[in-house]
């Protein structure tokens, strides 16, 4: 009876979860009517939230979701991470590895001003998928949005111009979203606090206080303009960043000229992750670089740690140098900037933040962390479009959504089965003890000792 009851409970739990997910399909269809706005504040380090006041941002996520930090992709640079956000891929998979690259097949060099689509075509950004699904997209300065990736830019976009103010970028995006209901996805990029972090370093609290106050005011402006356009409450908004920032110093320089001659190698990208092409004996060049400095690791391409997801691409050079946090690689010169990023993506100083608000998101919900590549499947889910193959996981972010349950069917059934096993075991033990009952009393009997050869058995050791 007990077993059959528990089995019935397990089935009911299974149906309850399945039934909930069935209702989610209806809610998902509703969510498809809500546009999505993705905003990146370049260089917004996650722990700035604990170090500085953000009244507007606090208001934003108090009625939405806050994620303490994201584990972003390596290298923790602007272009690789912005392309990862909109493709859900590691840098080795989408091909935008750094701000400067060299392709050994085409013999071409890449800089951030390059608009050649061949650099970007290894992946499909979400705005292209949105347009392939019959909708429109809009982007204000998002890296790659003005490039004809797979023969398509964003439907509405700005050619990159850092002189265009945040208010102008936001104003145009808001107008596109309001005037054209077919715009389902919009992306907005802003250069701060990255620019100030580079110039003064994140430890300069005076300058960082100023710029972060401006960033918070921009978030207030964002909410205000969306309200004026009648979009607030009818649009899902994700605020995030690409990376953090580390303090650098003139006393923490790694000079390559002190280790080998410039005739031995060519530099594709320099610091804090340097891409090196050996020009003669590869083993010798690697050996010299490997012994160059205690605060720099040298890797042959095949030996780059798998956890970095940074070796399975032809654009990754034969030798990669990775500086320790706060150290700067130069050939022979002074410190180029007081703050920098690009370091190992496990470092807290490299982690960005995330906050979300809108009809799809829970209110006052808090999460510790997930991977930045998980944002892509989340966005595809919100837009109701098929996701391209990616390295993200929707399971890790689904708890943020009103329409989703965090109790997985497999987990629920597993718990019920575990309880079933424990209760069945206890029931069997109880019945066994009951069947044995108390031993019947017997008259006293004298113990008779045996007097035979068994007494000679040795004791056990």
Image (cartoon, rainbow, N blue to C red):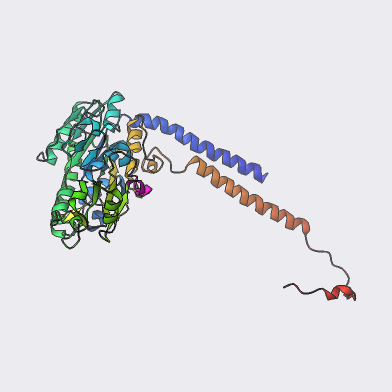
**Is residue 441 depicted above or below 336 in this figure?**
below
Residue 413 falls within the magenta-colored stretch: no
- The answer to if 305 sits in the magenta stretch is yes
**Magenta extent:** 301-312
Asked if one can make out residue 161 in the rendered structure from this viewpoint, the answer is yes
Q: Quadrant of the N terminus?
A: top right
Q: Taking 95 as reference, is 302 above or below it?
A: below
Q: From the top left corner, tell me how far across and down residue 64 is, in percent.
A: 30, 44
Q: Quadrant of residue 403?
A: top left
Residue 250 in picture, x, y percent from top left: 15, 61
Residue 38 location (% of width, % of height):
25, 38
On screen, residue 211 versus residue 367, left or right, reads left
Q: Residue furthest top?
A: 134
- How many labels, in total? 0
Q: Depth check: 73 or 217 in front?
A: 73
At 68% from the left and 52% from the top, the residue drawn is: 427
Q: Image quadrant of residue 296?
A: bottom left
Q: Furthest-front residue in view?
A: 281
Quadrant in the picture for the C terminus: bottom right
State the residue at coordinates (27%, 61%).
294
Mark yes or no: residue 69 visible: no
Q: Quadrant of residue 108?
A: top left
* Residue 384 screen position, x and y as percent: 35, 30
Seen from the viewer's position, the closer of residues 345 and 296 is: 296
């Amino acid at each position: 009876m007990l077993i059959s009851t528990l089995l019935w409970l397990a089935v009911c739990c299974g149906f309850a979860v399945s039934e909930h997910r069935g209702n989610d399909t209806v809610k998902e269809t509703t969510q498809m009517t809500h546009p999505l706005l993705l905003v990146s504040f370049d260089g917004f380090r996650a722990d700035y939230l604990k170090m500085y006041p953000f009244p507007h941002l606090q208001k934003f996520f108090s009625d939405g979701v806050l994620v303490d930090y994201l584990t972003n992709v390596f290298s923790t640079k602007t272009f690789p991470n912005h392309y990862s956000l909109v493709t859900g891929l590691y840098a080795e998979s989408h091909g935008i590895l750094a701000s400067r690259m060299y392709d050994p097949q085409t013999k071409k060099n890449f800089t951030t001003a390059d608009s050649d689509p061949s650099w970007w075509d290894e992946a499909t950004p979400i705005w292209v998928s949105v347009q392939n699904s019959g909708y429109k997209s809009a982007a204000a300065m998002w890296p790659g949005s003005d490039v004809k990736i797979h023969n398509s830019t964003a439907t509405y976009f700005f050619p990159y111009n850092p002189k265009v103010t945040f208010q102008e970028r936001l104003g145009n995006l808001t107008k596109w979203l309001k005037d054209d209901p077919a715009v389902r996805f919009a992306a907005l990029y802003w250069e701060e606090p990255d620019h100030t972090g580079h110039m003064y370093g994140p430890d300069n609290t005076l300058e960082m206080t100023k710029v972060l106050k401006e960033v918070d005011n921009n978030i207030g402006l964002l909410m205000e303009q969306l309200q004026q356009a009648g979009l607030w409450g009818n649009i899902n908004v994700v605020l995030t960043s690409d990376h953090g920032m580390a303090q650098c110093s003139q006393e923490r320089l790694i000079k390559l000229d002190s280790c080998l001659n410039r005739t031995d190698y060519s530099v594709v990208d320099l610091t804090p992750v340097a891409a090196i092409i050996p020009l003669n004996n590869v083993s010798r060049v690697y050996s010299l670089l490997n012994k160059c400095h205690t605060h720099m690791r040298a890797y042959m391409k095949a030996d780059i740690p798998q956890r970095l997801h940074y070796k399975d691409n032809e654009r990754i050079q034969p030798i990669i140098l990775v500086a320790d946090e706060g150290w700067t690689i130069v050939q022979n010169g002074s410190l180029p900037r007081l703050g920098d990023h690009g370091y190992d993506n496990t470092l807290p100083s490299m982690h960005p933040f995330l906050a979300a608000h809108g009809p799809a998101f829970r209110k006052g919900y808090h999460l510790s962390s997930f991977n930045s590549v998980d944002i892509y499947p989340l966005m595809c889910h919100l837009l109701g479009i098929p996701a391209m193959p990616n390295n993200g996981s929707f399971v890790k972010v689904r708890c943020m959504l009103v329409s989703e349950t965090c109790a997985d069917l497999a987990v629920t059934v597993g718990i019920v089965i575990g309880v079933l096993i424990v209760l069945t075991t206890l029931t069997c033990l109880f019945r066994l003890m009951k069947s044995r009952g108390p031993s019947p009393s017997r008259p006293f009997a004298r113990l008779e000792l045996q007097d035979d050869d068994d007494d000679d058995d040795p004791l056990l050791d």
